[in-house]
Image (cartoon, rainbow, N blue to C red):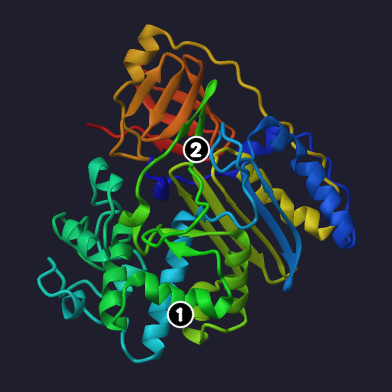
Amino acid sequence: MRYARFRVHALALAPLLVARSAAAQAPPSRMELERRIDAYLAPLATSGDLSGTVLVARGDSVMYERAFGKLRLGEAAPNTPETPFAVASLTKPLTVIIAAALIDQGRLALGDPLSKWIPGFPRGDRITVEHLLRHRSGIPHRVTAEADEMVPHTAEDMVRLAAGRELAFEPGTSSLYSSAAYSVLARVLEIAGGKPYADLLEEIVLRPAGAAHTANADRPQPGRPSGHFRYPARVKSTSRNLSFLVGAGSVYSTPRDIFAIMRRLTSGGYGATARTALVRQSSLRWNGITDGFRAFADWDSTTDVTVAFAGNLFTGAADLIRRDMPRIARGEQLDPPVVPTVSLRPIGAAARARLAGVRFDVNPSQPLRFDSDSVALLGDWLLFVTSDSTFFSPQDYATVRVVVGANGEVDALQWGEGPRFARVKE
């Protein structure tokens, strides 16, 4: 699935919990917080649904940090707090910090046309640096074929690929989340900054924050894990070269490094331009999903609590952690989650024929297909068959219902208690 258009809705998780929440108490001590978090995470770790590092902090102090799972599932080497996971779209705010620094230095301006930096780019006279930053350029989200994503790429390579694709709309007239636009922006930053993106990242973002376990995908880094998807009775590893997401999803990092970057940002250490661009309503909510990796980092100014997670097994465990760790840090008493168990069913021939090849507006470019009689996919988003009209989504623990119209045709997918994704008419 092209994850940019997919939104996880925590309400879909509610029926899976036997949650007991007492009235909020005073924030627990470090020892008590560790005990409560360990108890909460235990069933997720025991089931094998949790593989990654969880960090909870108050102010500048890390109160909890623990790694779970393996670098490569089925092997012995464990994840550690220093394991650098692919953090996907958490790369984008780091790119914004670089752009803000170059703007503050007078080397770049929001109103600069793309043609100033990359002459000959189609409609480059109408696309501005601000359009690239705000997803208003019209450049499609993806400009690569599957084969392109298996080999190394530079930002200059990505500009050539983006230049070969038609714009989705006239620049500035609409909005479309676009990783490819951020890769084009990365090339602009290289030209304006006079250095490769990885060097700008190191000098402007990482070194000042002391983020020693973070690097761009094109730089060697020991201990990088594989990303994983959990299929029935097996786990599938991923192998794409994430350099094609330069500037957009190409960074490997740890929760502690992301926490350090957030603290520097919110304290003004990267300058007022960066802080104004990224800190909205006195909070931060960064999210990333790619290739079996899942990451998020949230900061709330009211409590000054930060929760960060990065992992290499894409399950609904991350969303439970994201929802409930701030509550535990505030002093709420929560029972551990009940990890869902799923009874798979082979889909009937008529239902399979009705669903196979149908496109939905969650991801219009990827039709629903069947990997087996009991597993369907939207792109690489797994759906386990539980009946002829329902699926279970292991990535967010949601029940997905097939909505059929009066004419017997599939109309939509209803995602838990959240959104309904309509069928794309051919």
Disc 1 residue crowd, few under 14, some 14–19, many 20+, Cα 10 Å: some
Rounded to the nearest whole Å, what is the CA distance between mark 1 and mark 2? 31 Å
Mark 2 and mark 1 in contact (Cβ < 8 Å)?
Answer: no
Q: In this picture, is 303 found above or below 76?
A: below
Q: In this picture, is 112 found above or below 314?
A: below
Q: Position of residue 161 (x, y in %)?
A: 18, 56
Residue at 37% in and 84% down: 102
Q: Position of residue 295 (x, y in %)?
A: 55, 52
Q: Which residue is mark 2?
A: 228
Q: Amino acid at mark 2?
A: His
Label 2 SS: strand
**Which circle marks residue 204 in the picture?**
1
Judge left or right: residue 180 versus residue 255.
left
Q: Position of residue 15 (x, y in %)?
A: 69, 32
Q: For residue 196, what is the image quadrant?
A: bottom left
Q: Residue furthest top?
A: 349
Residue at 31% in and 30% down: 367
Label 1 SS: helix
Q: Amino acid at mark 1?
A: Ile
Judge left or right: residue 166 versus residue 420.
left
